[in-house]
Amino acid sequence: MHLSEITHPNQLHGLSVYQLQQIARQIREKHLQTVAATGGHLGPGLGVVELTLALYQTLDLDRDKVVWDVGHQAYPHKLITGRYSRFHTLRQKDGVAGYLKRCESKFDHFGAGHASTSISAALGMALARDLQGEKHKVVAVIGDGALTGGMALEAINHAGHLPKTNLLVVLNDNEMSISPNVGAIPRYLNKLRLSPPVQFISDNLEEQFKHLPFVGDSLGPELGRVKEGMKRLAVPKVGAVFEELGFTYIGPIDGHNLEELIATFQQAHKIPGPVLVHVATVKGKGYEVAEKDQVGYHAQNPFNLATGKAAPSSKPKPPSYSKVFGETLTKLAENDPRIVGITAAMATGTGLDILQKRVPRQYIDVGIAEQHAVTLAAGLACEGMRPVATIYSTFLQRAFDQIIHDVCIQNLPVLFCMDRAGIVGADGPTHQGMYDIAYLRCIPNMVLMAPKDEAELQRMIVTGIQHDGPIALRYPRGNGYGAPLMEEGWEPLPIGKGEILRNGDDLLLVAYGSMVYPAMQTAEILHEHGIEATVINARFAKPLDTELILPLAEKIGRVVTMEEGCLPGGFGSAIAEALLDADIMVSLTRIGVPDQLVDHATPDESKADLGLMPSQMAERILKLFSKQPSVVSV
């Protein structure tokens, strides 16, 4: 059977180990060819090929449910659930998504792009099954890195107290975080623990002791402790922790041995209550380049499959915002021991790997634990440090209560640096940084700022570190504009002060962050049509520079706001509120992301769909001018 013939995972039933091995090889080939062409997550999926095939051969996927944590490890799952013929469209507009989506396939039982959710979701499904009197199996597949997230531990704690709820958790351990010993002895202990003789001894231990000389019925309560001690002999140290939490622990299992995996999953399905199967895998398995560089090849842009090297750029690009941030913060930290950079398992993505290499004492990685990262930063700030919590916009959402409760209520000097703010592209709705302006703007004591380019980013980092209170800095994914950078001597910006970049009497364009340059381009197009616009780089969404904005709004009479974030509660809403509070009645148009999810596509494709390209924004404004001039209440 060829991989292309598999449209339903139940077609794996009855295949021999040899046939499954052939399918595994074809999955890796298709996976590599596709990601090399389109970009995407590489290492995670390559590591779970055998795990996926073995698990699915032991399940009835018309009834049973599998929840994959994050979903970036589920490319093999996609290839055997009817998406082989469309897999070449991976992460492209209108193509196969890079994560699981319930609307994409009936086999995608739970969608997620953030880690540590799978056990909670699967437990919810298992409880619903029991309440409805059904009998199907429910499985959660979670990586060892995701176990650093508190949510996963909360779910384990809950499931462990439900001994009558059947739930299988598969721990995909690729040694990137938890690294228990994997080898002949653990495998032997696992086989011993599952073998009928050991099960017989364990189940009939009391009867065995009664036949010992001088013992008989005299053991009493000591027998329980003896039984527990014998169990511990057959469970590796990490497994004992799960056993204490109420799970039956099996493992570690060789995650690339199909025969062993199938036998283990078959046995695990027979055990009542919560069960955890610990599977040891190799991230990037089958592609030597990815196996050697498991961090670098976690995900890749399009690359040469033969060499593993990225496709060359047609022309040199300015440095990315992340790199400018990392270099600037590191130089500041080298001269200020109070500065501490904090990441939630995203050192490379945020640029903090630069700080880690050059000033390791002032670098902290908390794992996938954003809530802990924020409160940790609060604790550091209490003791005179200057913590910089560097977390993607989409991930900072997970720590909303900690931002309010632990930082803002106490007015602590924590700088939040939100990488990937705005439209991020192929990762889709789970990763779009749409909401930080809206969800942070409502919090007392919080200051919000965003740079127009990478040079202004440098000054805002200094501004944030010197500010004596909570302050948040958002900046986009990707490269800057090529603005001249300084090596040192950056001056802070005055809090709440914007700047005028262009003067005109017909229209006031007030832009925030990544929309400032597009606003200038829009103004140029309008100029060609005889409309002259004043353009303000707001710099701050909170506090607004009302001394600058309001008089100009009242004088000009037409205001357009531009932001790369959600319109409800966003930057344009802040301008509208300020105008209303000042009793200034003018025509106001807010341009940004409407109240909808933004699907996976390139950033420019998404912006075009949303009408956020300069030519589209200019056309919209021209249509407003073509109407009869009127004063409209905001």
Image (cartoon, helix red, strand yellow):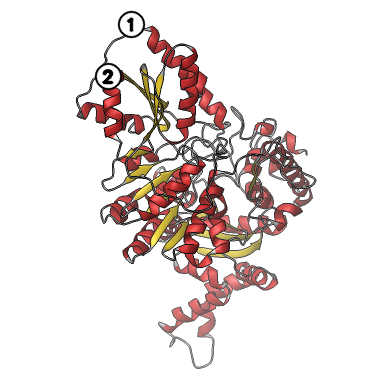
Give the percent coordinates (x, y) of residue 248.
Answer: 51, 64
The quadrant of the image that shows the C terminus is top left
The residue closer to the viewer here, 492 or 188, is 492
Helix, strand, or loop for circle 1? loop
State left or right for residue 476 relative to residue 541. Answer: right
What residue is shown at x 34% (from left), y 41% (from top)? 439
Q: What type is the residue that disc 2 sits on?
A: Val
What residue is shown at x 76% (from left), y 54% (from top)? 288
> Alpha-carbon distance for marks 2 and 1?
14 Å
Instruction: Name above or below for residue 507 compared with residue 328.
Output: above
Instruction: Tell me which numbered mark, 2 or 1, is placed earlier along the sequence.
Output: 2
What residue is shown at x 43% (from left), y 57% (from top)? 150
Q: What type is the residue that disc 1 sits on?
A: Gln
The residue wearing badge 1 is: 628
Give the percent coordinates (x, y) of residue 260.
Answer: 69, 59
Give the percent coordinates (x, y) of residue 414.
Answer: 36, 55
